[in-house]
Image (cartoon, grey):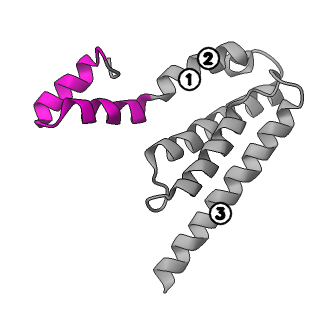
Amino acid sequence: MITPPVAIAAYAGAAIAKTDPIKTCLSAIRFGWPAYVVPFLFVLSPNLLMKGENADIIWAVVTAVGGVWMLTIAVIGYFSKVLDIGSRLVFALAGFALLIPAGVVPGGVWVDLGGGVLAAAIVFYLLVQARRNVVS
């Protein structure tokens, strides 16, 4: 309902707001992309469906939520400020690393950990930078 060529909801919203329908469709894609990715995560990681050990379920949920969050920041291009292309690429890399389910590839836990460390580092860096800009 939100992606071209059908995009009925996006076109209806554009008509109501009296805006360009294509720009509205592109904005809808930017905000709605997780609706297309999450079902694949359910297939690749049954732990997201609460099947398995508690620790595995918690790990899968945390990394999936973190991955969607990081990729959304990369797609939207805003965290504590408008992001440059380098920061967006780092967020995208961290998001992709977090979205890879641990049981799908050998060493998947290490990929998740690397994505988590990268995500924490970029978030911490940007929050410290934003705080410095507010103080000065």
* Residue 132 seen from this side: yes
Q: Amino acid at mark 2?
A: Phe
Coordinates of residue 76 in the picture (x, y in percent)? 44, 45
Does the magenta portion include 62?
no
Quadrant assignment, res 6: top left
Bin the neighbour count of mark 1 within 10 Å (Cα to Cα): few under 14, some 14-19, many 20 and up. Answer: few
Tag 2 residue:
40
Which residue is denoted by mark 3 in the rendering? 124
Where are the magenta residues, as a range?
A: 5-32
Residue drawn at (10%, 36%), measured in percent from left and top? Answer: 18
Secondary structure category for the residue under label 1: helix
Q: Which one is nearer the viewer's eye here, 55 or 92?
A: 92
Residue 20, percent from left and from top: 18, 35
Sequence-earlier tag: 2 or 3: 2
Q: Which numbered tag is attached to residue 37?
A: 1
The disc labelled 1 sits on which kind of residue? Val
